Amino acid sequence: MDTPMTDWLDGLHQRLMNQVPALTLDNLGTVADILRQTAQLLTALAEMPAGFWHGAATPHAAKALLPPAPTRPPSGNRMVRRLRGGFLPEVGVSVPEAAIRRLGLAHGDYLALDPIGTFPDGRRRYRFQLAERAVEPPGDVRERGELPMAIVEPSDQGGLMVQRSVDGPLPARIVLNAEDVQYLNLAAGDVVDLAYWADDPNDVRVCWVHRTRDTEGGDAAPAAPLHDSRPAQRRPLAGRDAEEDDRLLDDLAVDALSGKRVLVVGCEPKRREYEAAIRRLGGEMDWVEGTEGQARLEAAIRRVDGVVLLTRFIRHQSFWDATALAKDHGVKVVACPKLGIRSVSRAAVELLA
């Protein structure tokens, strides 16, 4: 005959089944702890006097003996959201914006990595899958905002800007970041999504480009509703830089930068590629933005043997500050007008060889 105690024991059984995950080499200790606690509980219940099982409060009294549910560490790698894309600090892997949008990811979600090959510079390629959602809003999250479907226009200063979207005028005119323009090969007429941090609304970056024209530089694609535009990946760079990015470094000695540390200033989107190339040549690389002030520039310059200034992605004041600081500290410095991996690597080798 079913009794409240029978129902309670059935609930205990179900709870035990829910708590015990599939066995893996990584969770054997956790499962052993769950089984050990349950065994102690059942032993204590079996030794209870008979009257314990017949009181009106039996289910509540017994419920108090349940061990607390063990906390299970989340599976996968925790993602930190950036203005464009994300980052997995535990494994040092960047998450492209395309994967974030495909999976509907947010700051604090956990991802599983599936290796699918390598990039030309030797970095591993991954397919990203959602492992676990963030259970509650992380405490370290910055409030992030987006301005969708903004239309790129030429600015009076020769760069690019946005001041309206497909829905109408924006609250203010926004001049696009020069690195974004170069890295994404933006042009007037493109439709982009912009991202910013609520506590720093002046730092606006292009996080997504909607495909509205031929990526090979030909005529515009056939007209289609903007909301049907297919999101585009990074467009190939024009000119020799695009060719150099795919060339090997075989003509440079494998130990050309052995024991040397190089500081590259500017072009954050290609930072990982530069670092991989310099490591292939035996060196180490530090990096700072092309808009850094004197204090951070000086701290970075003190640690290195040579400085490569990417002139297309460094403001004039930072250029002159870096040049003067390098001279003051006896550090070699070179200006590099190109952004190709081979160009930057060769500039570092010629500077320090």
Image: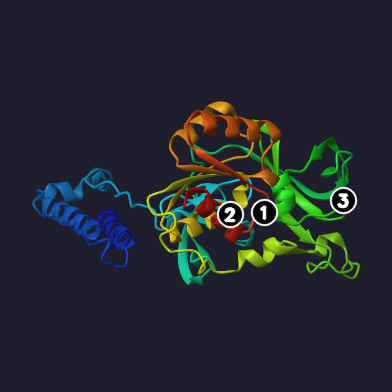
Q: As shown in the figure, which amino acid type bears the numbered disc 2?
A: Val
Mark 3 sits on what residue? 166
Residue drawn at (50%, 59%) of the image: 277
Locate residue 10, reporting x and y percent: 29, 61
Question: Along the polypeptide, which appears first: circle 1 or circle 2?
Answer: 1
Q: CA distance from mark 1 to mark 2?
A: 7 Å
Q: Mark 1: which secondary structure? A: loop
Left or right: 150 as drawn, with respect to 14: right
- 10 Å crowding of disc 1: few (<14), some (14-19), many (20+): some
Left or right: 165 as drawn, with respect to 333: right
Mark 1 sits on what residue? 338
Residue 10 is tagged as none
Task: Identify which residue, 144 or 331, lies in the foreground.
Answer: 331
Task: Identify which residue, 310 or 348, lies in the foreground.
Answer: 348
Above or below 330: residue 231: below
Q: As shown in the figure, which amino acid type bears the numbered disc 1?
A: Lys
Locate residue 152, reporting x and y percent: 84, 49
Q: Mark 2: which secondary structure? A: helix
Q: Quadrant of residue 163?
A: top right
Please name the colour scheme applied to the rendered image.
rainbow
- 10 Å crowding of disc 3: few (<14), some (14-19), many (20+): few
Mark 2 sits on what residue? 344
Q: Quadrant of residue 346?
A: bottom right
Locate residue 43, reporting x and y percent: 11, 54
Above or below 234: residue 140: above
Above or below 148: residue 99: below
Q: As shown in the figure, which amino acid type bears the numbered disc 3?
A: Val
Q: CA distance from mark 2 to mark 3?
A: 39 Å
Q: Quadrant of residue 211?
A: bottom right
Q: CA distance from mark 1 to mark 3?
A: 35 Å
Q: Mark 3: which secondary structure? A: loop
Question: Along the polypeptide, which appears first: circle 2 or circle 3?
Answer: 3
